[in-house]
Amino acid sequence: MTDPKMLKEIEKKVLWLACWTIHNANHLRESDEIKVGGHQASSASMVSIMTALYFSVLRPEDRIAVKPHAGPVFHAIQYLMGNQTRQNLENFRGYGGVQSYPSRTKDIDDVDFSTGSVGLGVAITAFAAMVQDFLIAKEWSGVETPGRMISLMGDAELDEGNIYECLQEGWKHGLRNTWWIIDYNRQSLDGIVHEGLKDRIVGIFEAFGWRVEMLKHGALQRAAFAEPGGDALRVWIDTCPNSIYSALTYQGGGAWRARLLDEIGDQGDVTALIERRSDEELANLMTNLGGHCLETLTTAFNGVADDTPTAFIAYTVKGWGTPLAGHKDNHAGLMTKDQMAAFQKKMRVRTGYEWDPFEGLADTPETLKEAFARIPFFAKGPRRASSAHVDVPKLPPVGDKAISTQAAFGKILDALAKGDTGLAQRIVTMSPDVTVSTNLGPWVNRRGLFGRAEVADTFRAEQIPSTQKWRFSPQGQHIELGIAEMNLCLLLGAAGLSHSLFGERLLPIGTLYDPFVSRALDALNYACYQDARFLLVGTPSGVSLASEGGAHQSIASPLIGMSQDGLASFEPAFADELAVMMEWAFDYMQRDGDAVQDERTWLRDETGGAVYLRLSTRPLEQPGRALDPELRQGIVDGAYWLRPPGPNCDLVIAYQGTIATEAIAAAGLLAGTRRDIGVLAVTSADRLNAGWQAAQRVRSRGDAGAKAHVERLLGDVPRHAIIVTVIDGHPATLSWLGGVAGHQTAGLGVEHFGQTGTVQDLYRHFGIDAEAIARTASGLSPGRPFGLPELKLDAAS
């Protein structure tokens, strides 16, 4: 849109719709909530920036992460363009309505990146730009025209540490085609930001190779500066403390006049400049900052013609154009009904026409519709892309007699790397400086590291022996990251959305030390919330990493795998289980079906999702068995009988992961004292528990025949039998098994930080070795809780 007057009208309309949406939710809609919330002031500060972008600057290939608190502005724009419904706007923050913050999975309009956990929506745009470069470099990719990955962010988001981790990673990888537009309103939730933040921002961005564009003064201010006395006005504005500027903005034209005349008025040029303007005109001049001047914004945005990463620092007023403007308490403030009535009159919106897309605008609806149809960003319709399914072949078996799951993972990927299947081409691996120690080395040696330019392996060029081929090229399929697990999960999130953002499927695999999954939780949750598809490999896990000490021994990660939505969690004990899981995972990562429950497991597998594997460095003797269809299905469903219980079973030992050898050994130790012992191999407590919970909900709705996989497994185990669960992780992962059919259960596992030692030292220390499992089982009797003496009653009692 090139007509400045029309663009100004659209700006006004967007401001009205955003504020009205929030007002309606809090003051007009029936609700049992005292305050629904919303952010009228934080929305208002972004209106001009977003109007300029969406109606004059953006192209269909651009992707945008919108500042969370500006969600109502985004939805107002989409509503004007016919991509959002009035019903959803009226139900803002209500059940099934427009979400509090833009959501790819919950909102119906064209959201590129979910935002909400501040800082993450900023950083993911940089990683999306890296993924775009990865795709452009591949011969099979259809991505030709680079889009700009744009984040609209609040200045307070710069307090988030993940932004600075991201900046450094971007510098390493030659980041390009990335814009971060900073809404520099100088206010946060609790007050005014510190003086001089702008200078710190400039220094940081420039240190990492970014261009910084300062958008401080609008066209009105620049014109005033050219008048006699304008230089003094400019100096005053540039040196005015943030808190004073905000307070005067709230107080209005009269306050501006008094302060300016008092501090720089000299009865000469400056006084004349001020006196030539009414109070309203003076207030408009003083709030005409760069971030609220459409001319300044469109000129600056359209003036960037190269791919250098660019930070725009756009000075704005929080609450601009509303009665809340400038007040330090306006972050979550709401206009009163009286304030809204005055605001509605100012916006020329008649009562009863508040939701009309064209009410109060100077141009006719027909003229506006015709203009909207020519806006490049919206011209091609919805921009959510898709990609074909990549065939997944059977993964080659690992034939070692004894091997760890981590080593088996490396061998499976190495075998894939030797071929040139569609699957192998679409895999991209990544790791935060633990590539070799998580067994990705063989894959990288065959497939290479990704770099937009060729970089030779210096050690090989100098003929120095090395097991690693560390060569960068555009054909490479591994992205090496620095030691920042947040960056790993943000890159996994971006790569896991490549089919939707760029129309090309990637199958991302990220490895990290399992204890440090917790360090990545915010970004991991964020990636899953966006429905990104990836394979996260946490290895090595548990106290099995004995010699490294407690800081490198994971306890809670199995529970994270169970509780994280959008993430199917597995923990194999044997290499053949791992191969089945990975084969299933590569297919599961590509599914996009309806949320229909499979009546065999009551899981919603057709929706697809991300996958987490918890692997170990501890070698185990392999079972050397054939994987029939039933066994393969049991591995995927979450459990199978390694040793089926007999008809007189009075003990079941259930384990997950590398502790399998101890569970099997304990069953052998108890063979003479316990009857028909069953050994249950749990491969996914996550899927096993999820299916059980789902089946219970189905039964509560009237389907009495619904039965979960775990209920069928335990259905033939006699009621008097006891269950001992054991895992190299928190015991709560498996101890819920007793609730399935009411079996007495003792849960063994790790609840406290470990220490250095051998594996057997730590297994004995935590009571998860074979002897401890056997002792626990021996201490249990039917009907008697673990650890309590048997109560003997005489006839009199």
Image (cartoon, grey):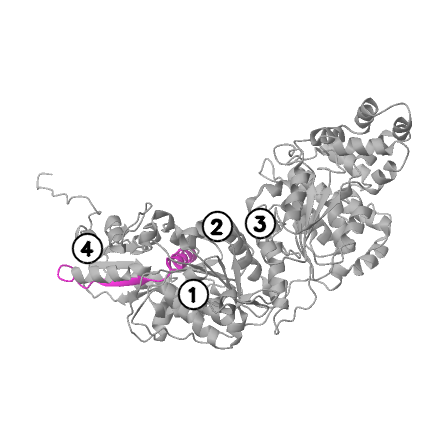
Which quadrant of the figure contains the C terminus?
top left
Which quadrant of the figure contains the N terminus?
bottom right
Displayed quadrant of residue 621: bottom left
Q: Which mark is in front, 4 or 1?
A: 4
- Say which element carries label 4: helix
Residue hosting label 4: 771
| Above or below for 281 versus 672 | above
Mark sitting earlier along the chain (2/1) = 2
Mark sitting earlier along the chain (2/4) = 2
Mark sitting earlier along the chain (1/3) = 3
Q: Which mark is in front, 1 or 3?
A: 3
Residue hosting label 3: 120
Is disc 2 in contact with disc 3, using a CB cutoff of under 8 Å? no
Mark 3: which amino acid?
Leu
Is 699 covered by the magenta stretch? yes
Q: CA distance from mark 2 to mark 3?
A: 12 Å
